Image (tube, rainbow, N blue to C red):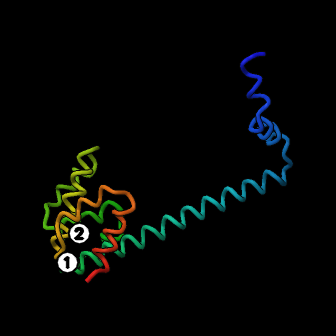
Amino acid sequence: MNSIQPLLDSPLFDLLVQSGKASTTQKAAAAGLSIAVLLGAVLFAMVVHLFMSFCLKRVCEKAGTTPGILIWIPIANLVPLLETAKLPVWLIVLFFIPFVNIAAIILLFWKLCEARGKAGPLGLLMLIPGVNLGLILYLAFAD
């Protein structure tokens, strides 16, 4: 028995072979479904971005600064956040250096927590996936 035989007997191989025999209608339906999934993913990403930008805007406003239009622009939103945290804007450079960016995010959110009148060590929660989103919501909507 040769080593490729198990691959030839697999359902995945059958699927690949059948995909070559698909009719034009089936291929068009698959392409349409792919486009719909892609558009859905892009729409979802846009909604998440807008919601998170709104939350960051509220954090800035509650800390006493006006974020302006930059808060809605990816990467540029770091400028109003750094200004709110009373950190120099040149620290944006640190967000592009691997591993250093983790420390920069913790520093930024530590200072944002303090600017909001919360305990600074809450910024360490940015290290925990899922909880970090909760921290942003907490800073945006808590009194």
Q: Nearer the viewer, mark 2 or mark 1?
A: 1
- The answer to whether residue 83 of the structure is visible from this angle is no
Q: Are marks 2 and 1 in contact (CB under 8 Å)?
A: no
Quadrant housing residue 128 = bottom left
| Quadrant in which the C terminus is drawn | bottom left
Residue 3 in picture, x, y percent from top left = 72, 19
Tell me which numbered mark, 2 or 1, is placed earlier along the sequence: 1
Amino acid identity at mark 1: Ala
Residue 51 in picture, x, y percent from top left = 41, 73
Compare residues 17 and 75 and report the one nearer the observer: 17
How many discs mark residues in the rendered view? Answer: 2
**Residue occupying the point 24% across, 75% down:** 60
Compared to residue 84, the image places residue 39 above or below, namely above
Q: Residues within 10 Å of mark 2 (few under 14, many from 20)?
A: many
| Quadrant in which the N terminus is drawn | top right
**Residue occupying the point 36% across, 66% down:** 133
**Residue occupying the point 30% across, 76% down:** 140
Q: Is residue 2 left or right of residue 87?
A: right
Please, what secondary structure does the residue beneath circle 1 have?
A: loop
Compare residues 92 and 120 and report the one nearer the observer: 120
**Residue occupying the point 26% across, 75% down:** 59
Residue denoted by label 2: 80
Quadrant housing residue 42 = bottom right
Residue 121 in picture, x, y percent from top left = 18, 63
Distance CA(mark 2)–CA(mark 1): 11 Å
Compare residues 23 and 133 and report the one nearer the observer: 133
Q: Residue at the bottom extreme?
A: 143
Compared to residue 2, the image places residue 116 above or below, namely below
Residue denoted by label 1: 63
Amino acid identity at mark 2: Pro
